[in-house]
Amino acid sequence: MSAAANTLAKARGDVVARALRLHEKSDEAANIRFTQEEIPLRIERDGQVIVRITAAGVNPSDVKAAMGMMPYAVFPRTPGRDFAGVVMAGPEELIGQEVFGTGGDVGIRRDGSHASHLLLDTGALAPKPANLSAVEAAGIGVPFVTAWEGFRRAGMPKPGETVLIMGANGKVGQASIQIATMCGARVIGVVRKAEGYRGHANAPVEVLDHSACDVAARVRELTNGRGADIVYNTVGDPYYAAATAALALKGRQIFIAAIKKIVEFDIFAFYRGRHTYVGIDTLAFTAVESAELLREMAPHFVSGKLRPFPIHADFTYRFSAAKDAYMTVIGSSPERVVLVPEE
């Protein structure tokens, strides 16, 4: 459909989206096959909108779902969880509004954001902070929603508390550091090799090289024997022993991922330490639930206390190069990867 025809159809909510499609799972990332197809979209009931996508993030979960690693991922579908765009059809008061969002359903159990347009419930929209570009907003979703929900569940960091971030330079790790330092906590970050912290922080961050020191012992040295009040373990089992040994009395450990699902669990140490473990799975969140968290965070992006990940031109891909974008993400690129529709 031409741009003029799309404009004429706005009143009816009729749009033809140009979408990336996955028809079957792939045995490995190199074999992921996209097609580009025209998908008709129409508002079917009150409370829905059609968003013209201006940018869409690419997450490791997008690639893993394409590889069939998530049993609830449906085929065929349009992938993509994170997005930024402009409302082009729906309630009159929303037309033209710049928005952003994410979801565990979007792009996994239903069609997602790697398309020119996306049909959503109005509750799935968060107004895009005016000081952020579309590509910056499109990179916020999964990492910041995961970090924010982890702290909400475990208890937001407080001034005077020590927060230990395992996997400090990962995207969720960086988002967690931003939030914890914004809240006034002391932050210690753990990395897997000799490197500094790569992201934004609202206070100095002490960095420990997991390959070169006893992390738990060093954390206790730095905290006069107390340990960490919160451990945000973004990696899982490789850091489990050190993270658990570093916990303070009544400490909380947050989990979002694992490589091997089974670890040796010391029940005695757990209950004697009065510890709390919190599991976070944002794939269980709908886009509406995710938008609630983005709206909570938005004022902090406006103030500059939270900042989007830098999006470099070399890591911004057209939809026609989606395969390259997916391979970059699964290759553990330290950069945030974003797709933008063809002009």
Image: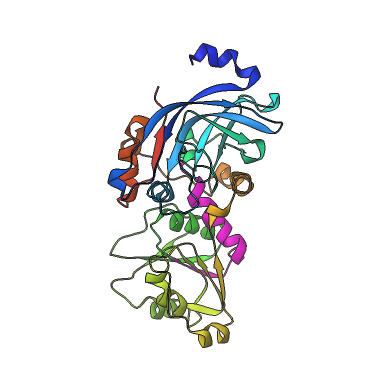
Render colour scheme: rainbow
- As drawn, 227 above or below 57: below
Which contiguous range is marked in magenta?
Answer: 139-165
Look at 42% across and 27% down and name the residue there.
Answer: 37
Residue 33 relative to residue 112: left or right: left
Residue 278 relative to residue 196: left or right: right
Rendered location of residue 35, percent (x, y): 37, 32
User: In terms of image quadrants, where is residue 277?
Assistant: bottom right
Q: Please tell me whether residue 154 belongs to the stretch shown in magenta.
A: yes
In the foreground, 36 or 57: 36
In the foreground, 244 or 71: 71
Residue 251 relative to residue 11: left or right: left
Rendered location of residue 84, percent (x, y): 51, 35
Q: Please tell me whether residue 150 belongs to the stretch shown in magenta.
A: yes
User: In terms of image quadrants, where is residue 10?
Assistant: top right
- As drawn, 22 above or below 261: above
- Report the residue that reaches farthest toward the right: 46
In the foreground, 30 or 270: 30
Rendered location of residue 175, percent (x, y): 48, 54
Look at 60% across and 24% down and name the residue there.
Answer: 96
Rendered location of residue 110, percent (x, y): 53, 41
Examine the rendering and report whether any part of residue 38 can be seen: yes
Look at 44% across and 74% down and name the residue there.
Answer: 243
Examine the rendering and report whether any part of residue 202 can be seen: no
Count of numbered circles on the image: 0
For the C terminus, the image quarter is: top left
